[in-house]
């Protein structure tokens, strides 16, 4: 595995990484000491020395807390330790860490007087699967309402490290320090907002252990798709960079297709054509310049357009309408062998018969396919996967397997999942992207990259990341029309990064 990749480990995989390292000869207490030092280092670097309250739980997370307390005390901080439960009930490495603290341990109660300038949350770790209740819940609520900053160990207590879901309540941390590799819950909402600034500490687990535990989930960063991203070549021209086709809606619904087409063109497609119903040709012609235009009256018309194999990628959905005609267009595109992006109405049109879509995607003639639903469209197409007790990551992964397509489950924590089980969680998208038409541009960007030959999963990941970067570059006031125009700057900044990988 490329050492610059950021794999995201489930709690079971992290436990396996710990176990493999211990079996390799490194004592568990050494890993705990390294973890505690990693947290203490962050605190010592980022905060002014003050009174610190360390809240320890009954497991290994609490053991980490005892080590943090000891180190900070040794470095001159004033430290008070509170324990949920009794010290006699601690066992293993956590008991040894408490023994090494050798200081006063106060009982953790709801009315405990915590007079501190900083709180260290070492109550529950990432593997907690039950709701936080009782004393811990009352204390969390009280501290969340106070101005005192909280540094959480591994995850904020109450956050599920696999799903990012909050069980009952959770600390709203100023910073979170995790170990070896991040977990999905650090990037999936609401966990991402609970964590504050995330730090990852090296605790001595060998880097290649991530390969041994079978990681298939990654943070979406350029290193994940660097090898597949199209680079400018002196000998390239419009015909070597693919020809993307975007199906337009009828006369009152043409804008979404044009947004998508502009996204495809700015993403690098050599040519882009809007395939328009005859009654919408004049409207589209009035708004298009570098993007070409052709008439497309029905599914047979789309088949004829895609019979020209230079037209190697197609997008259906933005403004298409929820109708039998849209279904026919989709099925015709799948029979063409062109790379296909399905968004918006192209997904909802199959809400009553999703199996027909999935069978066609898996058909012999179909090219690589990407589905780009938001949560509402996802629920209509995958009704069996709307159970919110399942993480967004697992829902997207199961949907990709069921559909036989790459699924981009959009949102502030967009998940990109492939049928083979690979998945990525995106974390660079800002609130500015929450504007009408933003998703249409994203679908067009996926299309433009696939037209240039990027594999479906890599194209989807790259488009989602660039979409976030474009939004960040523009900032407040962004509307969808701005996104394609920010892509040149986003790609210009990206290319030196790719060259250095």
Image (cartoon, rainbow, N blue to C red):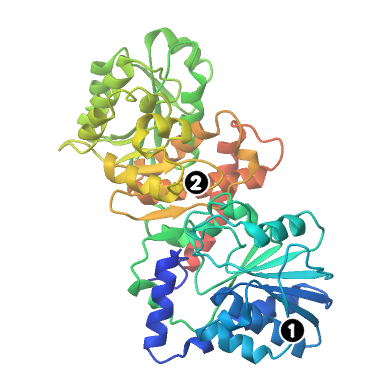
Q: CA distance from mark 1 to mark 2?
A: 38 Å
Instruction: Judge by depth and name the residue closer to the eye, 426 or 131.
Output: 131
Q: Residue at x 66, y 36 (%)?
A: 478
**Left-right relation of 474 to 221:** right
The residue singled out by tag 2 in the image is 414
Q: In the picture, which quadrant includes the N terminus?
A: bottom left
Q: Residue 81 location in percent, x, y?
A: 73, 78
Q: Depth-wise, is mark 1 or mark 2 nearer the camera?
A: 1
Q: Residue at x 50, y 11 (%)?
A: 252
The answer to whether residue 269 shows anywhere in this view is no
Instruction: Judge by depth and name the residue closer to the eye, 217 or 155.
Output: 155
The residue singled out by tag 1 in the image is 72
**Left-right relation of 485 to 75:** left
The answer to whether residue 81 shows anywhere in this view is yes
Element under label 1? helix
User: Picture quarter containing residue 477?
Assistant: top right
Q: Residue 109 location in percent, x, y?
A: 72, 66
Label 2 packing within 10 angstroms: few (<14), some (14-19), many (20+): many
**Left-right relation of 122 to 394:** right
User: Picture quarter containing residue 336?
Assistant: top left
Instruction: Judge by depth and name the residue closer to the eye, 1 or 20.
Output: 20
In the image, farthest residue toward the top: 279
Q: Is residue 412 above or below residue 440?
A: below
Q: Residue at x 49, y 63 (%)?
A: 183
Q: Residue 15 location in percent, x, y?
A: 43, 73
Element under label 2? loop
């Amino acid at each position: 595995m490329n050492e610059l990749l950021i794999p995201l480990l489930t709690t079971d995989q992290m436990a396996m990484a710990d176990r493999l390292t211990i079996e390799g000869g490194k004592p568990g207490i050494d890993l705990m000491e390294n973890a505690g030092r990693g947290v203490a280092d962050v605190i010592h670097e980022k905060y002014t020395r003050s009174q610190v309250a360390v809240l320890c739980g009954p497991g290994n997370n609490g053991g980490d807390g005892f080590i943090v307390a000891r180190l900070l005390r040794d470095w001159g901080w004033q430290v008070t330790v509170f324990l949920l439960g009794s010290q006699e009930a601690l066992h293993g490495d956590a008991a040894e860490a408490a023994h090494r603290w050798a200081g006063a341990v106060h009982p953790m109660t709801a009315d405990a007087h915590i007079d501190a300038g900083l709180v260290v949350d070492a109550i529950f770790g990432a593997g907690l699967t039950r709701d936080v209740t009782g004393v811990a819940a009352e204390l969390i609520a009280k501290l969340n309402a106070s101005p005192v900053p909280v540094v959480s160990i591994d995850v904020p207590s109450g956050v599920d490290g696999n799903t990012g879901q909050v069980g009952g309540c959770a600390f709203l941390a100023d910073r979170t320090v995790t170990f070896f590799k991040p977990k999905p819950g650090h990037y999936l909402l609401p966990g991402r907002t609970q964590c504050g600034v995330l730090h990852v500490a090296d605790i001595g687990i060998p880097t290649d252990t991530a390969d041994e535990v079978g990681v298939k989930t990654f943070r979406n960063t350029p290193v994940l798709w660097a090898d597949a991203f199209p680079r400018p070549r002196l000998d390239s021209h419009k015909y070597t960079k693919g020809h993307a086709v975007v199906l337009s809606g009828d006369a009152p619904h043409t804008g979404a297709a044009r947004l998508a087409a502009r996204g495809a063109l700015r993403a690098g497609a050599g040519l882009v054509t809007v395939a328009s119903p005859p009654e919408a040709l004049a409207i589209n012609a009035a708004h298009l310049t570098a993007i070409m235009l052709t008439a497309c009256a029905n599914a047979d018309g789309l088949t004829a357009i895609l019979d020209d194999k230079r037209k190697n990628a197609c997008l259906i959905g933005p403004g298409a309408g929820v109708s039998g005609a849209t279904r026919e267009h989709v099925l015709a595109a799948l029979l063409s062998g062109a790379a296909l992006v399905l968004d918006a109405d192209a997904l909802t049109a199959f809400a009553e018969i999703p199996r027909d879509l999935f069978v066609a995607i898996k058909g012999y003639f179909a090219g690589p396919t990407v589905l780009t639903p938001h949560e509402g469209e996802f629920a209509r197409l995958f009704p069996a996967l709307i159970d919110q007790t399942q993480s967004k990551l697992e829902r997207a992964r199961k949907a990709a397997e069921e559909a036989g397509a790459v699924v981009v489950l959009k949102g502030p924590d967009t998940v990109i999942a492939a049928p083979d089980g690979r998945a990525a969680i995106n974390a660079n998208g800002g609130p500015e992207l929450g504007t009408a038409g933003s998703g249409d541009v994203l679908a067009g960007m996926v299309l433009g990259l696939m037209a240039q030959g990027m594999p479906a999963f890599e194209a989807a990941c790259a488009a989602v990341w660039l979409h976030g970067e474009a939004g960040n570059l523009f900032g407040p006031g962004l509307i969808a029309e701005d996104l394609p125009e920010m892509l040149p700057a986003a790609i210009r900044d990206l290319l030196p990064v790719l060259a250095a990988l």
